[in-house]
Image (tube, grey):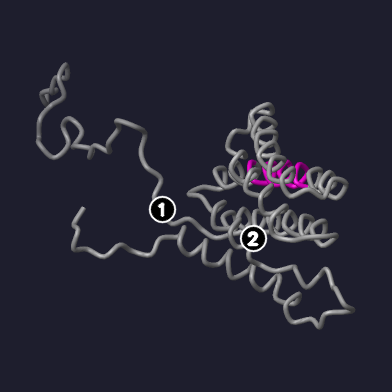
Amino acid sequence: MDRNKFPGVGMRMVKTAVAVVLCYFIFLPFWLRTPVGEYDPLQDVGPFYACIAAIICMQSSVEQSVRQGVSRVIGTCIGGLVGLAILFVDDLLNQPIFLGLMIGLGIILTMWICNLIHRPAACSIGSILVCVVILNHGGQERYFYTLFRVMETIVGIVVAVAINRLLPDRREEPLGKGKRKVPEGPKPGEGTGAVPSGGETKEKS
């Protein structure tokens, strides 16, 4: 590859950008609406986690995007449920030291469950969501926060898979491994005046 040559803009780049823009516009109405009451749960809804999910799940093929998306949804749901369970226990104990220990136990539990169901790719996002749910908000707002983060992530995954499916992929299909296209030569006797082996010319009587 020539290092002085600028890389082209591939379809994966275009698809990723389109998916992120679409996620933004899907959640834009939540940003533009006027908050209702002292605390409006919908004011926390936004495109941030949807855009992240769309970027991560946009792979080179639809099949890869689906596999990545399924793992991310599973990890998000497991991490969200574990995080909610820790929040419930924390509301009863209300001890910051115990909360710190429970975060560690929650991450271990999340990764163990992901491996138990043979989804090791979901471990990272599940563990991240445990920390996000527990550390980002306090009080009753944390429960809404967890629900919205899971929802936003799922929206981003669906958008990524849909865009990858709908937009064309202009890459040429490669030939089989170890195979190359060999140009066809002239058939025996064509254009050379030669007689195919085994054949005899008939004399005119």
Q: Earlier in the sequence, mark 2 or mark 1?
A: 2
Residue type, label 1? Arg
The residue segment tinted magenta is 71-83
Between residue 106 and residue 96, name the one nearer to us: 96
Q: Which residue is mark 1?
A: 171
Label 1: few (<14), some (14–19) or many (≥20) C-alpha neighbours in 10 Å: few
Q: Residue 167 lies in what quarter of the image?
A: bottom right
Q: Is residue 45 above or below residue 107?
A: below
**Residue 75, magenta (yes or no):** yes
**Residue 147, magenta (yes or no):** no
Residue type, label 2? Tyr
Q: Which residue is mark 2?
A: 49
**Residue 102 at x, y percent in the picture:** 72, 40
**Residue 88 at x, y percent in the picture:** 85, 47
Main secondary structure along the magenta-highlighted residues: helix
Q: For the residues marked 2 and 1, what is the alpha-carbon distance in whole angstroms?
A: 30 Å
Report the residue at 63% width, 33% height from top.
Answer: 119
**Residue 187 at x, y percent in the picture:** 20, 33
Q: Is residue 100 above or below residue 58?
A: above
Identify the element where label 1 is drawn.
loop
Identify the element where label 2 is drawn.
helix
Between residue 37 and residue 134, name the one nearer to us: 134
Q: Would residue 169 appear left or right of 97 to someone viewing this image? A: left
- The outermost residue toward the top is 198
**Screen quadrant of the C terminus:** top left
Between residue 193 and residue 96, name the one nearer to us: 96
